[in-house]
Amino acid sequence: MASYSDLRHEDVTRLEEQYGFRMSGLERLEGGMATSSFIATTPAGRIVVSILDNQDDEAALRLARTVDHMGQHGVPTGRVIPRADGRLLSRVDGKCVLVKEFVPGRTLRRLPDATLITAAGLLGRIHGVATGGLEVPVGLRRLSPQLRNLLADFPDQTHARWIRGRLARLDPYFPADGGPRRAAWTVIHGDFTPSNIVVTDDDRLFAIDWETVTVDDPMLDCGMSVLNMCVTEGRLDSARLRLFAEGYRSSGRRFEDDWIRPAVEYAAVIVSFHRYRRHHMRFPNPARFDYFRIMVDFVEREFPGSVSP
């Protein structure tokens, strides 16, 4: 589980010296899976101070540069605030610290129709960002060979076989090397879901949490977003999917209708893998032992095939 950090008085004093402004009214932000984040007030406004608990120096610097890159290319996100010496990162107790502007707003469990259209358009804008100068992993939106090897350790081998069977059907759509679709790969967010979209009071949208950014097939990114935005009462909602496609196309990008269903299925299979591994193996939680089955049931209803759980 993430090793969460605190900011002590001496830590704040050191950060103030490095950034060249005062920080007061520190308040912890809840909900981070891989960071310990705090809101602070400065003479220029509020900021977010994030201790990147589970990232090494290389990953932390990549994240900082990614957020900075996205902001410079017009993607609305919390702007990175550099130190007085121009560096993007600082350090507390051996962990990297990233400071960003605070984006006032809220996250929604379910996006209203109009917001859904805008969000899909924002995803299209992200996919249109130039990759030049962006140093991120490539091809990591699919279940990697290393993670697939862990299926042998699943206590529930029935579920492991189900995942293998589904992936065998889906891999031809999204081969690891990209196949003929490789030329269309773009920068993708990786987890563009309602929890990572801040909606301001004047209905502007900001994309946050770039830890999963990679260069990969944009339809895989769309698949994860549709899974989280266009499912109603356990079924893929065709009306909301049409709105999503409309919004995505409004960015000037092509929405590939023939590829969205396998992309959504792939996303659901990946989520079932991670939910099972998390709640049964990494951090056993009997209250959530059946949580992965929500995805299994969804896949079986929406994408009936030759395998069954």
Image (tube, rainbow, N blue to C red):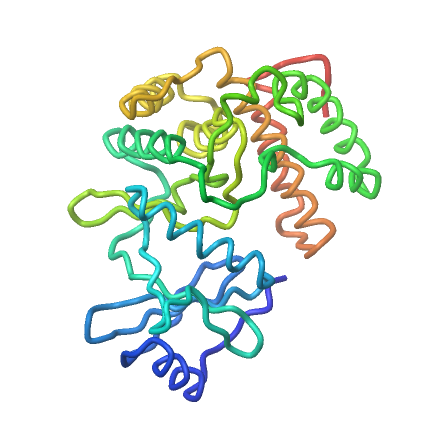
In the picture provided, is 58 more to the left or to the right than 100? right
- Name which residue lies at 30% across and 21% down: 252
- Name which residue lies at 35% across and 38% down: 110
Tell which of 254 and 231 is nearer to you. Answer: 254
Tell which of 24 and 105 is nearer to you. Answer: 24
- Name which residue lies at 45% across and 59% down: 31
Q: Name the residue furthest left.
A: 202
Q: Quadrant of residue 197?
A: top left
Residue 299, image x, y percentages = 59, 23
Residue 11, image x, y percentages = 44, 83
In the picture provided, is 190 more to the left or to the right than 143? left
Is residue 176 positioned above or below 18 on the image? above
Is residue 142 positioned above or below 5 on the image? above
Tell which of 257 and 195 is nearer to you. Answer: 257
Q: Quadrant of the N terminus?
A: bottom right
- Name which residue lies at 26% across and 34% down: 115
Number of marks present in the image shown = 0
Q: Quadrant of residue 181?
A: top right
Q: Quadrant of residue 86?
A: bottom left
Residue 184, image x, y percentages = 49, 22
Residue 261, image x, y percentages = 52, 17
